[in-house]
Amino acid sequence: MQVLRSMLFLLLLLAPLPAFAYDVLILQSMHEKGYEEAVRGFRKECRASSRMIVLSDYADLDLIRIVREEHPKVIVAVGDRALELAQKQGETPVLCMMALNVKPRRSVRGISMLFDPARYLSLFQSLGTERVGVLYDPGRSGVYVKKALAASKGHLRLVLREVHAPKETPAMLQSLRGKVDALWMIPDVTAVSAASTEAYFLFSQSERVPVVSFADVYLTMGAAVALTIDRYDIGRQLGEMAQDLLEGREPEEGMVTPRRVLSRSNDGVVRQLKLSGLGGH
Amino acid sequence: MSNRNDLHKRRCATMKALLLFAQLLLLLFAGTASAASAGDDLSSLELFNGPDADVVTGSRSPRPASQTAENITVVTSKEIEDLNAHNLTDVLYVVTGVPIETNRTPGTATNARVQGANFNHVLVLVDGIPINNLADNFADISSIPAQMIERVEVVKGAASSSWGSALGGVINVITKNPHDDRRFGGLVSGSTGTRDTMDGRVEASGTVQRFGYYLTGGKLRSDGLLPNNDVSLGSLYGKLRYELPTDGEITLGSGFTENYGGQVGTDTVHVDQNARQLISVLALRQPLARRLILDVSLQGRRYSSRYSALDATETLLYQGRSDKESSRGGGVKLSWLGDTHLLVGGIDYDHVKAKLNFGGEPEEWRADRLGAYAIDTITLGSFAITPSARFDRTGSGGDHFSPSLGLTYALTENSVLRAYTAKGYSLTSLNRSDSTEKVWTWQAGFETGDLPYLWLKGTFFRNDTSNVQADGPLGEKQRQLREGVEVEVKTLPVLNTSLSAGYTYVSATDKATDAVIHGVPMHTVKIGVKYDVPEQLHAELIGNLVDWNDPNHSRTGGVIWDVHLKKWIATTDTFSLEVFLSLRNIFDGRQYMDSIFRNAGRWGEAGVRCKF
């Protein structure tokens, strides 16, 4: 018995000591490079102790129980599923990033995946466009488009088309023929889908109007310019927010727009459409 | 008797109307359904990264190890729905270490045991309100409809340092909250089965700005799967929530159940029971300062029941007993989360009153109960230490001090060792001052999710119970030792199929004589096989074996197998239509503690469920 006790004691001493007293629970939907880049940025800025749980690593995860037993001071949700789950527990404050499709609740703070519309509007102005076509699903992007509409008044005209299913996109694009000088592709999974992206660039070629997008991937398909998010900086921005919260300062309410914009253009398309004024974004 | 038949006919008509309504809804919605499923990470990743999003598959585990010192099992609302459960009895039926004492027609009065502890040692709470009756500490788990349950947490072993009278464990039922993301959502469900066993339910839930609501109602009825075992259980439950501008919230919840039917029928005697229960709670949760939260609640319960022992024609009353109870009280709790401490302290108060009428001799009891508790969880690296204590002035069964100490050690991020010891008590009756039974519990165990494809948990327990009156109020007081082991295993899904198994061994002896105590389940086995394709098909096979170890009364008779199927007919973001089917006791096995309360034979039911 004495031997057993000694062995157990030695085992405890030799065993690795993962820290379970931690302040931040990082809840990530799945293993994905973009998410991991954002988490790296978060950790750079917020040095608090943390535990990371990737939801796709578990068949069944009871977050309510984890929160109650490990009592983190803040939950950082990375991705839609993580945000959805984090919102179901009501005990611990939730910060979020990299979530597009799940609507954050009033009490949730975080960094949005959408830039301030003014960033795009000033780009359109510099391109000299007056009429900008936008396809959107009111259920997903209604609030964002409303904000863009308010900001565009007096500067340029947004020509809006509502879509309620991905298959409606090509027809709605056709309805913009001769009515717009540019297309603004917004991150809306109804308006932009694998089945409909080609229609944007066919429209761009036939109407000779540029497409301004939100991700680099569309540049190779035929977009003229993309204003894209910097995932690492979004992580840093959320890290500052978490640090504020942990130190008793109230961070900004609600979802904050990303502060850093990466602007890239497709030179071939720019030359072909004879676009000017692409600089300084 | 004819009145009861008329009543049954009227209720059957209501149930049939409800089923018809559900079918009409299905027809209305069926045309609009599609298999679309949006709103997940993959669609947003595809949007930003293109169709070749770089998603890496990590190593998988069934679940993370729990970091608590106590042995706790949780059943979630999804698991409850997959079981096609009617009430709390069906939910607890699958929990390892929880044998159900009588498993008959759904809705029949039933109680649960925890790791060999008697039914009157187990505290059953619904949103913090105890539903154990005052007369003999019996909690009828069948009176809690499954539809309103969000999750059930079963604490195995003495939990008096947190909850007071809870010698053998706690079954903590947490009801559903208003749906946060929608203004209105709901459910209509209906099923029908053997012996006109029907279950109809409706549910509505939503949040409008700061105001949330959750409402549900249902009716369960059956002609009885066993002689004189008919059931008529109606229920209503509602919860209103208001989010305060100060980050706090106020919740008002109230539930009513009315259950009447036959309990037992022999050639000469029929025993019937009518019971009504109303529970209400008004709760405030308010952060007072950084990491300091105040919880205040007012709660009440009214309960009445009537037992009648009649002749087989139900015209001659042999014996009657009525019980009217009420409790009113509340609690205040403060929680503070520091850098290494989580400190919780509070006070509970309850004024309880019981009026018993046994054979025309009414008696009344009252008591004021006050409890004060403090729980500290100290986290130091891989260690978490939880000392806690509670002092109770019961007003009827003496004063009790219940300390406990828990320790966990995280071997890795997903493996934990745990140990727990606690002193506990249970008031087994309000009307006897010497009815308090006491326990010292010791538990040690481990849990790991580090093994490939497996989650494994093992617990050794030893419950030294004193002052037990096994032979009734006039019997000799015993000291009983109940010790044993519990093992639970779950696997990852492979080809959409996962397995789970739980085994509990209990050795129960009289400490003075070493004699084996009969009627305490020696072996309990729970087996589960699940096939699950989300939003398409769910199939579950459940095996249950309880060896009550009472050769003169009980029967083990092999594993009782149930199968539950659920098929999605149509789903959209805001609508789903499912059909479900349950076949219980497939091989018509016999397994019971006492032949008077023998289990139901093979029976089945099928239904539809529509969520919108």
Image (cartoon, coloured by chain):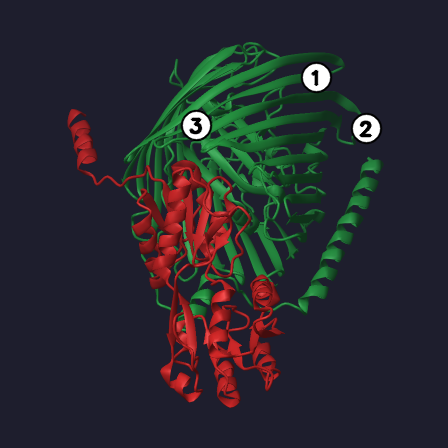
Circle 3 Cα neighbour tier, 10 Å, few/some/many (<14 / 14–19 / ≥20): many
Establish if A170 lies above or below B520: below
Identify the hue of chain B: green
The first of marks 1 and 3 along the sequence is: 3
List x then y, in percent, for residue B109.
63, 33
Q: Nearer the viewer, residue B57 or B3?
A: B57
- Amino acid type, residue under disc 1 in the picture: Leu
Q: CA distance from mark 3 to mark 2?
A: 45 Å
- Identified by mark 3, the residue type is Gly
**Which residue is the site of mark 2?**
B315
Q: Are marks 1 and 3 on the same chain?
A: yes
- Quarter holding the N terminus of chain B is top right
Which mark is on residue B157? 3
- The disc numbered 2 marks a residue on which chain? B
Q: Is residue B241 visible?
A: yes
Q: Which residue is mark 1?
A: B356
- Asked if residue B126 can be seen in this view, the reply is no
**Disc 3 and disc 2 in contact, CB within 8 angstroms:** no
In the orientation shown, which residue stands out farthest toward the front?
A154
Chain represented in red: A
Which quadrant would residue B53 be assigned to in this image? bottom left
Picture coordinates of residue B163, whole percent (x, y):
50, 24
Rate crowding at label 2 as few (under 14), some (14 to 19) or many (20 or more) other CA atoms within 10 Å.
Answer: few
The count of marks equals 3
